[in-house]
Image (cartoon, helix red, strand yellow):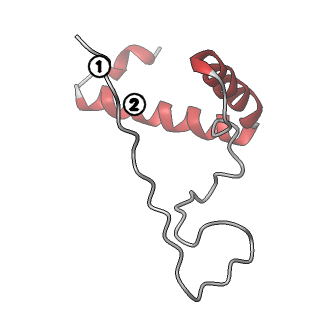
């Protein structure tokens, strides 16, 4: 059978000739806008660590204004859905 050898991906490590590196990073590094604020981008070990980091981020991230806004949006969408399927709203009248 033989031993399977896997090739490693080659890294492209280009640096421009006249680039002044001030912060120690690479000049063409693609970075998200809110990466420094997210906890889930940390280096975690295994899938359990990723789920724990996501749960910590979810539990500490919500405030009252966001929860109220989400509830209002969900209520409006439910009412629009009920109106779209011709739900009889007269059952709510007394």
- Mark 2 Cα-neighbour bin, 10 Å: few <14, some 14–19, many ≥20: few
Quarter containing the N terminus: top left
State the residue at coordinates (57%, 36%).
Answer: 70
Farthest front residue in view? 2
Q: Residue 44: where, in percent of width, then height?
A: 66, 28
Q: Earlier in the sequence, mark 1 or mark 2?
A: 2
Query: Which residue is the site of mark 1?
Result: 88
SS type, badge 2: helix
- Mark 1 Cα-neighbour bin, 10 Å: few <14, some 14–19, many ≥20: few
In this view, 63 is above or below 27: above
SS type, badge 1: loop
Quick check: 71 left or right of 43? left
Residue 79 marker: 2
Nearer-the-camera pick, 24 or 73: 24
Quick check: 56 left or right of 6? right
In this view, 12 is above or below 84: below
State the residue at coordinates (73%, 26%).
Answer: 56
Label 1 or label 2, whichever lies nearer to me, is 2
Q: Residue 20: where, in percent of width, then height?
A: 67, 84
Q: Residue 43: where, in percent of width, then height?
A: 66, 35
Between the C-alphas of marks 1 and 2, the distance is 11 Å
Quadrant in which residue 64 is drawn: top right
State the residue at coordinates (38%, 14%).
Answer: 91
In this view, 60 is above or below 49: below
Quick check: 50 left or right of 74? right
Quadrant in which residue 93 is drawn: top left
Q: Residue 58: where, in percent of width, then height?
A: 67, 29
């Amino acid at each position: 059978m033989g031993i399977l050898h896997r090739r490693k991906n080659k890294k492209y490590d280009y640096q421009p000739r006249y680039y002044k590196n001030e912060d120690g990073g690479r000049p063409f590094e693609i970075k998200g806008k809110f990466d420094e604020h997210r906890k889930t981008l940390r280096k975690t070990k295994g899938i359990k660590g990723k789920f724990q980091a996501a749960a910590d981020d979810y539990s500490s991230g919500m405030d009252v204004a966001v929860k109220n806004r989400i509830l209002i949006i969900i209520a409006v969408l439910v009412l629009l859905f009920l109106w779209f399927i011709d739900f009889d709203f007269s059952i709510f009248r007394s």
